[in-house]
Amino acid sequence: MKKVPFFFMLIILLMVVAGCGVKSQKNETFKLRVSHPYQVGTLHHHYMEWFDEEIQKRSDGRIELEIYPGSQLMPSDQEIPGVLQGQIDMTHSLSSIAGSFDPIWYFFDLPFLFNYDPNDPLVYMDSRREFIESEKGGKLIAQMAEERGLKILSMGSTDLYATLWTAKESKQIEGVETAKGLKLRTPGGTVAPNTLKAIEASGISIPGTELPTALQQGVVDGLITVPLYLYDNKLPVRTQSMYPFVNYVMPVMISQKKFDELPEDLQEMMIETGKDLQDYSYEKVKEQILTINDRLQEDQGIETYYPTADEIESWKEVTMPVWDIYLESEPRAKELIEEARRLLEKGGV
């Protein structure tokens, strides 16, 4: 009987061990803790449920989410630090919240950032999506996030741009001069206050729970917010003006460390599902946004003002210096602004 050389026996042993390792990795399961500040029933939460269903299906049950909505685990401004500290694995955040962690996210608060037509919301939605999918746009922001320990899986949205609303018809905002002296509830951040200053209005920070009373009592004349949100919350306003004052994206973030611990095939699947979530969110918003202004009029008596081309140009001229102010405070945004301007010119704006 011939003896099997030790060298060949060693190779066979290593192959068996490697095979067992792959099999073990394939059988390992993962449960990721997700915290977000939105209530059950919102599009934000629905997106996380959709994402959970998809990754379970695509992984044959090897990975799933444990979702905690409504800031059950921690306040919204602590969720990103919570991801980095390992308290949670993922969050579905908002660009304005992420801006308090990294000011680069306040880029999305710049006015007139994407191509838009006040009469056709799809012009804006397509322009925003083109930027998000651009190497020097959304993908560059995702790269910056990775440098800080966050893997961006998706950058979708739940609404259109934030428009301008007033509680009284007599204070409807039309030309730039009509905004002068108005007190508007601001979404916070560092950019929107500068935009309000540019149009000679003032921003007031008011908790959401106090906003209806503040509008009714004239503490504020109006607010800056997105149309689907306002429709759902039935705030006491009478007019909307279609100016793209603030933009929002809703990044789905996972700890880079946790992501790197996943098997390679699950990493690829999570990235692909994140891309599909962006497309899914686009379609969900599209379903509702095309008729939102008609529904605001019919159901809540809110009149929508569609500015003329000349008025839009006047607003752009007055608010463009806000871009320079932001760039001065956040030099990393230089490439992002250049890309935004390139896409605006490409779209004929």
Image (tube, rainbow, N blue to C red):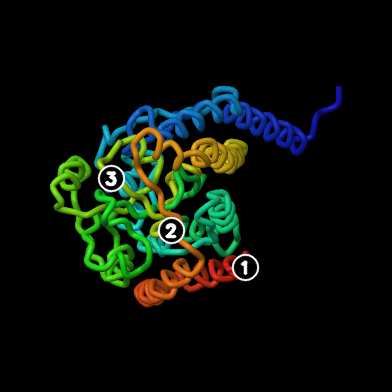
What percent of the width, then of the height, locates residue 128? 54, 55
Which quadrant of the view contains residue 318? bottom left
Which residue is the extreme one toward the front?
A: 170
From mark 3 to mark 2, how far is it between C-alphas? 18 Å
Question: The disc labelled 1 sits on which kind of residue?
Answer: Gly
129 relative to 83 in the view: left or right: right
* Residue wearing tag 2: 244
Q: Amino acid at mark 3?
A: Val
The residue lying toward the viewer, choosing from 348 and 208, is 348
Is residue 2 placed above or below 146 in the rendered structure?
A: above
Report the front residue among 179 and 73: 179
Label 2: which secondary element: strand
Up the image or down, 42 lies above or below 165; here it is: above
Can residue 149 be seen? no
**Looking at numbered disc 2 in the image, what kind of residue is underneath it?**
Pro
Q: Which badge, 1 or 2, is on the more N-terminal residue?
A: 2
Instruction: Give the residue number, with chain letter if any, for mark 3.
Output: 237
Of marks 3 and 2, which one's residue comes earlier in the chain? 3
Q: Marks 1 and 2, how far apart in space?
A: 17 Å
Q: CA distance from mark 1 to mark 3?
A: 34 Å
Image quadrant assignment for residue 66: top left
Q: Secondary structure at mark 1?
A: loop
Expressed as whole percent of the image width and height from the top left, the position of residue 241 reads 39, 55
Residue 36 x/y as whole percent: 35, 38
Please tell me which of labels 1 and 3 falls first in the chain.
Answer: 3
Q: Which residue is mark 1?
A: 348
Identify the residue at image location x=38%, y=35%: 34
Label 2 CA crowd tier, 10 Å (few <14, some 14–19, many 20+): many
Tell me the quadrant of the picture where the C terminus can be found: bottom right
